[in-house]
Amino acid sequence: MTHTIEEVRALYHRPLMDLVYDAATVHRANHDHYEMQMCTLLSIKTGGCTEDCGYCSQSVHNEAELEKEILLKTEKVLEEARKAKEAGSTRFCMGAAWPRVLEGRAFDRVCDMVKGVSDMGMESCVTLGMLTENQARRLKEAGLKAYNHNLDTSEEFYGKIITTRSYQDRLDTLENVAKAGISACCGGILGMGESEEDRISLLHTLCNLNPQPESVPINMLVPVKGTPLENVPPLDIFEWIRAIAVARILMPKSMVRLSAGRLEISKEAQALAFFAGANAIFTGEKLLTTSNPEKDFDYALLDALGMKPRAPFKDDSAERKSGGCCKPGGCGCQKEAA
């Protein structure tokens, strides 16, 4: 079932306490609300990207102080995956600063990395830029669980952040991922100077993807010195909570993931985000090139809240009850997602 922009706008403008309550109810109807998916993200090829994303330290168009690195060796990546697994992560994500996937030895090595991570019993995820349908099929054959390709922001605001690839390029890659039978990990970045209407538009686009994303990363901008967005003022934390709650209601079966920017957010605000339906986090010292809370902080927070890590490859269909409205007979807070 599709959602109109008017429906998403009306949901976004609901009183925050009512919105969070309904999101929590939807979350409990579709997930074990005591579980948290623990993910680790590793940059397997850093810097030198020819895209001009205004938020990114890895772009050659920006002046951030970042040392360019070549593609890591497969053995090194699998060693880091084993460490992540030992630390409790169940999904291992690998990111390469490429504008698009090119055929050749480097892509062959990434496929080997995916197979190695999958063989050790972890869910594998990669983010490699744009890719073709055939490349997506190769990743699927290697055992890839999910492909991350964020929309970043609304189509209307997109051109103010990125000019070297179009919004349609991103949608085409997501279509190729879906055709290959790979789950999509697709979300956005909040706090880049976008308007409230841009956040509504982004959520509208995400919830109408077919199929809806398996996971939805909600990033908060981490301003990096040397990038065009280094002086953008921080977004009000309640706008972040509001976006998480709306995402949970519109995409009840998706994993809503707290991603970049979490280091600057208080544990109390993170707990409210979990209550509003966020059920996945990245754990570890870094997210590609930005700092992230250390695992001891994450596990202490989960323990304080009575939460536990989610098992890998969990059969979602067995744990999710039939969705729909958050109250018997309906309350108008949402329509059942397709």
Image (spheres, helix red, strand yellow):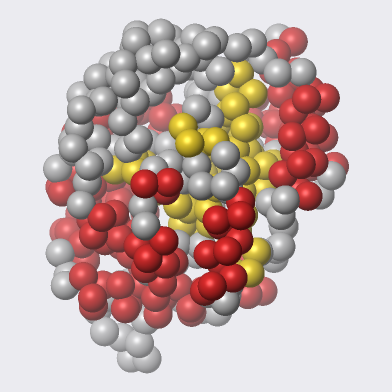
Q: Position of residue 34 (x, y in %)?
A: 57, 74
In depth, the one of 27 and 104 nearer the eye is 27
Residue 83: quarter of image: top right
Residue name at image x 50 percent, y 42 percent: 292
Visible residue check, residue 289: yes
Apparent side of residue 220 relative to residue 182 in the rendered image (left or right):
left
Q: Position of residue 257 (x, y in %)?
A: 48, 53
Apparent side of residue 277 relative to residue 198 in the rendered image (left or right):
right
Q: Position of residue 271 (x, y in %)?
A: 42, 67
Depicted 72 relative to depicted 254: above or below: above
- Quarter in which the N terminus is drawn: bottom left
Residue name at image x 46 percent, y 32 percent: 290
Apparent side of residue 182 relative to residue 159 in the rendered image (left or right):
right
Residue name at image x 48 percent, y 78 percent: 28
Residue with the most extreme bottom position? 328
Q: Position of residue 295 (x, y in %)?
A: 61, 51
Apparent side of residue 62 relative to residue 186 in the rendered image (left or right):
left
- Quarter in which the C terminus is drawn: bottom left
Residue name at image x 34 percent, y 43 percent: 220
Visible residue check, residue 247: no
Residue 177: quarter of image: top right
All told, the count of numbered labels is 0
Depicted 150 relative to depicted 51: above or below: below
Depicted 147 relative to depicted 300: above or below: above
